[in-house]
Amino acid sequence: MSRMKLPLLLSAGVLLLATSLAVPAFAQDSQQPNTQSQQPSSQMERDPATPSTMIQSDSQTFTGTIVKANGKFVLRDAANKTDYVLDDQDRAKLLAGKSVKVTGRLDRQTNTLHASAIEPES
């Protein structure tokens, strides 16, 4: 066998081996059932911190007073008689006892507001 054919044969062998290993893995993936939610992505998205929790994707505005309840700062919405746990406890602590406007997404399963902005209500 000539010296020029040896590298070509080795390259072909490596390529053949790599292809034969990749094909079964690809075939296995394509046979898996589609288990993704059928929810339109514009309405719902997954929270990376809690992958099994569905959250509303659009930001909303909530108003109320920040109070401490059960060891956590919450937004108390007196009009709806609801407390929303605030995910940013440090920012909430700075505005404790004040009427605020919170912009963010609500995780309906845990009743947690993922706040993008918390500001005093004017």
Image (cartoon, rainbow, N blue to C red):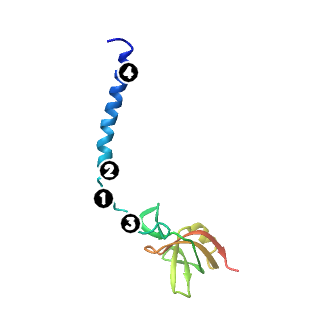
Q: CA distance from mark 4 to mark 3?
A: 48 Å
Q: Residues within 10 Å of mark 4 (few under 14, many from 20)?
A: few
Q: Residues within 10 Å of mark 1 (few under 14, many from 20)?
A: few
Is 87 on the left or on the right of 109, as rendered?
right
Q: Which residue is mark 3?
A: 37
Instruction: Give the camera-side residue of 85 and 50.
Output: 50
Classify 106 as above or below 35. below
Q: Which residue is mark 4?
A: 8
- The residue located at (32%, 50%) in the rendering is 29
Q: CA distance from mark 1 to mark 3?
A: 12 Å
Classify 3 as above or below 54. above
Of circles 1 and 4, the one toward us is 4
Q: Give the mark nearer the N terminus: 2 vs 4.
A: 4
Instruction: Name the element at disc 4.
Output: helix
| Spot occupied by residue 86 in the image (x, y as percentages of width and height) | 54, 72
Q: Which residue is mark 1?
A: 33
Q: Amino acid at mark 2?
A: Asp
Q: Give the mark nearer the N terminus: 4 vs 3.
A: 4
Q: Which residue is mark 2?
A: 29
- If the image is split into quadrants, where does the C terminus sit? bottom right
- The residue located at (62%, 79%) in the rendering is 97
Q: Give the mark nearer the N terminus: 1 vs 4.
A: 4
Instruction: Name the element at disc 3.
Output: loop
Q: CA distance from mark 2 to mark 4?
A: 32 Å
